[in-house]
Each structure stands twice: as C-alpha cells, then as structure tokens.
Image (cartoon, rainbow, N blue to C red):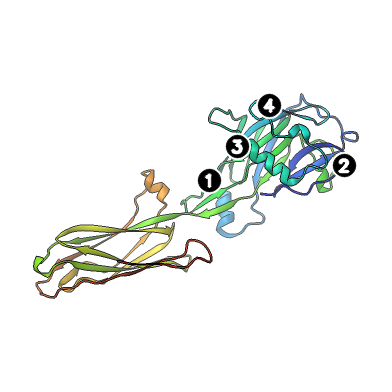
Amino acid sequence: MKLGKIMKKGSAVALICALALPVLTLVNTQAADRIDTGRLCSLTVKVDTESTTGDFKEDLGQMTIPVALYKVADVDASGRYTELEGFQGLGLDGISASTTAQKWLDMAEAAYGKITDETQKTEEIFVAGGTGSAGNLATGMYLVVPGETFNQDYSYKYTFTPYLTALPGNLYAQGGTDEWLYDPVIGLKAEREEQYGSLIIEKTLSSYNESLGSVDFVFQVEADKNGEAVRSTVERIRFNGAGTQSVVVDRIPVGAQVTVTEVYSGASYTPEGEVVQKATIVAQQLVDAGQAVAATVSFNNKYDDRLIPGTGVVNHFEPPQEEGDDWNWSQK
C-alpha cells in the first residue's frame, strides 16, 4: 500500500486517509487552527470495494477484519510529535516538508517491527460488512495494523500493509481545507493470495496373487476451478499384497473440483465400484485445525483369477511455482 502525494505548505505534518489509500498531508499551522489536544477523536475504517469486482469485492464485504491501533506518539497543539516509550527512534520528531512518502512507509515498517508480544494495543476495530469504527481516541500518531484475514471458504488469504495515520487529520492534500478533522475515515486496500489443499487417493486391494508379484494402479487427476484447469497429473499406487494404501496430491487450489479416474487397474485385478470419482478441495488450514476433512476419493479392486502380471512407470509433471519457471519432471 502506498501513501499518497505529499503537499507542501509549512513544516507541520498530519496524516489522513481517503477511502482508497492513506494520504500524507502537510499543513500550515500558522493558517490552521491549533490542535485541541484534549479533544477525543474517532476513527472509521472502510474497505475499498469501489475499485474491486467479482469475488474479490464479495469477499471483502463479507469478512470481519481485525484492525489493531497502536498509539506511537503524542502530538502538541502545533502539530509536533513526541514518540512514546517502545516506539522511540522512528523519526516522527523530525517530520518536515521534505519527508517523502517512502519515508512514511519506512517509519510505519519500523514501528511495526517494534511491536512485541508485550505491546498493548491502544484499540482494536473490527471491520465487518465493509466498515468499523472506534471512539474515545486521544490525539496523536497511530500505527494501523490490519490483520490477515481469510474469506469464508479459506480459498484466499487477504493481507494489508500497516501504515501510520494521525488524529486529527485534514483534507488539505485532497483539495479541501486545512481544518482539523477529529473523526476521519480511512480506507484499506487488500492484496490476496490463493490458498491450497490436498487430495487423498485411497486404494483398497481386497485379494492378491503373490505369484504375480507387485501390481500398479494408475489414476488420472484433473482439477478445475471456475471453468479453468488448475491441475492435471497422474499418480500411481503399487501393491505387494492385499490391504489399503494411499497417495497425496498436494497444492491444489481450494474450491477446485477434482475428477479422479482409475485409468489402469492392474492386469489381473478388477475394479469394485466406480472408477471415476469427484471431490472438492478444502483448505489445509481447516484440515490442520480439525474443522474439515481433506478431500478423499476411495477405490477398490480384487484379484480376478487371471494370471497376467503387470507393472509400469509413471512420468510425473509438476507445474511451475513461479512465472517463467520450467515444469518439474520426475519418474516413479
């Protein structure tokens, strides 16, 4: 997240956020009213859904996003900041008209790095339905730390960049007046990262002919999400006796519909039941937390009294993890 344009008009600085991005505002304290440091402020946080569409917009409107506020500095009536204990060394006492947007980002990052398990939040806002607010906030500079949040089915993780904002602020940089706003509204812009889960293919061989040696069963795996193929691979399970074995296919996008087809059932073994099965991928986070069960398909075979041995080699291709990387090939 980037801070907005810096405007020159004197040496005192205040931060305010529009609904889209935080905006750094320089105000002329000779022209503006002095800050009423005894006045309590409020802060409203809104999610930017105007520039988003589709499921991105729907997710942001449905999630509850925790936003922690840490007061990092006091402010005096003239707009000068004094850093609080635990946040010294940020450079807020040296703010001037030449302070760049990148410097503000660096100071926010430095402030975030000073937070420990013992650091007490000044306040916490829960943004639900796209908005949330807190009142009775003292004037000063605050570090705003939105927590990472998952959408309802955990198919995406949304993250937000911590930044600094001041109470009060003003709209001078946006063409407004330099009047102090003690109840500003700030916005959050999100980035999201697709989440993955696993598929378990279980195979049960109820009877086995030892004289034929090991036997392979081969499965074609096709994963589709929103009409787009997201994974295609072939897996093999080898048996040296009756029993149940499994193979795990990792890194399939959450929500993908997976079709698994048993394409080779052993030369002397007959499938019992369906040879094509489907499953929906669930998030690994939910599986690890015991809130869901990993997507699983199960196949059964039995010895059919023929005496035809059979085995094979599977060429396994993994898609590239990063754009520009080559496919990874292995043989099983």
Q: Residues within 10 Å of mark 2 (few under 14, many from 20)?
A: some
| Spatial separation of the CA atoms under disc 2 and disc 3 | 31 Å
Q: Please state if 302 lies on the left or on the right of 164 as rendered.
A: left
In the image, 241 versus 39, the foreground residue is 241
Looking at the image, is 85 positioned above or below residue 309? above
Q: Residue at x 61, y 50 (%)?
A: 190
Given the current orientation, which residue lies at the most extreme top position? Answer: 38
State the image coordinates of residue 47 (x, y, percent, origin top left). 63, 47
Q: Residues within 10 Å of mark 3 (few under 14, many from 20)?
A: few
Of the two numbered discs 1 and 2 in the rendering, the one whose residue sits closer to the viewer: 2
Marks 1 and 2, how far apart in space?
A: 38 Å
- Distance between mark 3 and mark 4 Cα atoms: 15 Å
Q: Tell me, for residue 9, which label it has, or none.
A: 2
* Residue with the mark numbered 4: 84
Disc 1 from disc 4: Cα separation: 29 Å
**Front: mark 2 or 3:** 3
Q: Amino acid at mark 3?
A: Gly
> Which structural element holds mark 4?
loop
Instruction: Write down the residue under mark 1.
Output: 149
* Closer to the camera in the image, 197 or 48: 197
According to the picture, the residue beneath numbered tag 3 turns out to be 113
Mark 2 and mark 3 lie on one chain; the one further toward the N terminus is 2
Residue 249 in the image, given as x and y percentages of width and height: 35, 60
Q: Which of 42 and 91 lies nearest the eye of the viewer?
A: 91
Q: Residue at 67% x, 54% y: name it.
A: 50
Q: Earlier in the sequence, mark 3 or mark 1?
A: 3
Q: Amino acid at mark 2?
A: Lys
Query: Mark 4 to mark 2: distance in Å?
Result: 27 Å
Q: Residue 179 in the image: x percent, y percent?
A: 84, 37
